[in-house]
């Protein structure tokens, strides 16, 4: 069916009728050229001048009114409404909080046979997780020294995935403000149904910045009914060869697992440790199995804009009318 998005503009359709109410101006007296004999001019013309104007508009007023009505119809923004479609809604409002501090650029993850940064591995795996969240509203928080909302809660998974892919290390500072990220998530989820608030927080370090301590933020989250699942991202210890011999390097020494575990337990969530890409994928698969919350089904009707058709027709009629009124005519006399 066709629907007008701005139907009130149709009230402008009868405006040309107001011209009929205006007083008509009296035609000025025109001087006449009187000739005693038209014989010298009898053969100057070539018959009916209308023959030389094949597209002469016989009813310019009618054409003008039709063009006006088409123009008004286009301004009212007609759209074609398709059949109503049921949206798959599970009722879960899920925020992802991803650490983009300076340490996330360390390239100690193996992906497709090559080393990639921690952020690149997160973007790949979390992107697949986002694509599977059909029916959930997703949002994205990025945090470093500062925490900011990159994408509000939305059903548009493609946009959330794209915003995650565009994240870069250092955009929010080099430090890590875990508590502020949790506080921002609480604020964004405050108006949502209490039983559907979920935050997945991923970091590779400890809280080194921010105004709110992570444990205190977790207590506030628990009071607001926000469930937080935390993911500690850091490879395990490994032996590397150096000029001083074989050395043992443990990247997880900077990871505050105790705090992340406390945050999850305080809010009724779970803590996960991701040492490589395979473990990270398994973690998201576990989170993917969270029971959905029942919610009323939402309907969606696809729309297709139609205003271009009446607008094009109105412009075509106006062009023909103008061309027909301004084309020079061949007359047979003075």
Image (cartoon, rainbow, N blue to C red):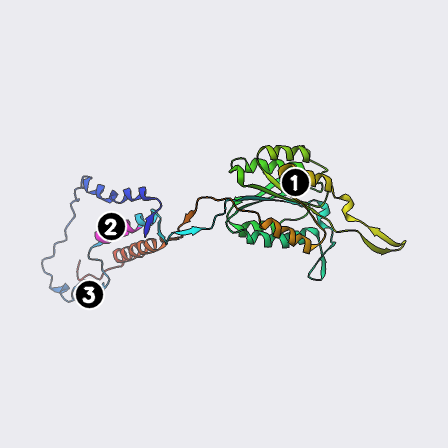
Image position of 324 (left or right of 213): left
Quarter where residue 327 is shown: bottom left
C-alpha distance separating marks 3 and 1: 89 Å
Q: Is residue 252 magenta?
A: no
Q: Which residue is mark 3?
A: 51
Residue drawn 80% across the image and 49% down it = 250
At numbered mark 3, what does the secondary structure look like: helix, strand or loop?
helix
The residue stretch that appears in magenta? 61-70
Q: Which residue is mark 1?
A: 264
- Tell me which numbered mark, 2 or 3, is placed earlier along the sequence: 3
Image position of 166 (left or right of 257): left
Label 1 or label 2, whichever lies nearer to me, is 1
Quadrant of the image containing the C terminus: bottom left
- Outermost residue toward the left? 36
C-alpha distance separating marks 2 and 3: 26 Å
Q: Kindly check if marks 2 and 3 are in contact, taking CB atoms under 8 A apart as contact.
A: no
- Specify whether residue 151 is in view: no
């Amino acid at each position: 069916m066709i629907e007008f998005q701005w139907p009130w503009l149709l009230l402008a359709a009868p405006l040309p009728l107001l011209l009929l109410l205006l007083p008509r101006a009296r035609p000025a007296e025109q001087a006449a050229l009187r000739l005693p004999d038209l014989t010298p001019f009898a053969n100057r013309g070539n018959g009916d001048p209308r023959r030389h104007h094949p597209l002469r508009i016989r009813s310019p007023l009618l054409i003008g009114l039709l063009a006006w009505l088409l123009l008004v119809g286009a301004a009212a923004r007609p759209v074609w409404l398709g059949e109503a479609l049921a949206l798959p809604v599970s009722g879960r409002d899920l925020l992802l909080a991803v650490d983009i501090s300076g340490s996330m650029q360390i390239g100690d993850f193996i992906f497709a046979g090559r080393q990639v940064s921690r952020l690149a591995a997160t973007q790949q795996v979390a992107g697949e997780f986002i694509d599977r969240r059909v029916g959930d509203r997703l949002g994205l928080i990025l945090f470093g020294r500062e925490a900011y909302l990159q994408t509000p809660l939305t059903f548009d998974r493609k946009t959330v995935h794209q915003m995650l892919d565009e994240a870069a290390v250092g955009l929010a500072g080099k430090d890590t403000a875990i508590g502020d990220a949790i506080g921002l998530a609480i604020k964004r989820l405050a108006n949502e149904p209490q039983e559907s608030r979920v935050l997945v927080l991923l970091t590779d370090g400890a809280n080194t910045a921010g105004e709110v301590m992570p444990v205190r933020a977790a207590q506030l989250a628990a009071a607001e009914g926000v469930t937080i699942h935390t993911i500690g991202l850091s490879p395990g210890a490994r032996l590397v060869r150096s000029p001083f011999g074989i050395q043992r390097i443990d990247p997880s020494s900077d990871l505050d697992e105790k705090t992340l575990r406390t945050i999850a337990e305080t809010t009724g969530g779970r803590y996960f440790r991701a040492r490589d890409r395979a473990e990270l994928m398994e973690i998201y698969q576990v989170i993917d199995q969270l029971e959905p919350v029942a919610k009323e089904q939402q309907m969606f009707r696809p729309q297709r804009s139609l205003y271009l058709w009446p607008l094009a027709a109105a412009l075509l009629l106006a062009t023909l009318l103008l061309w027909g009124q301004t084309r020079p005519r061949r007359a047979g006399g003075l």
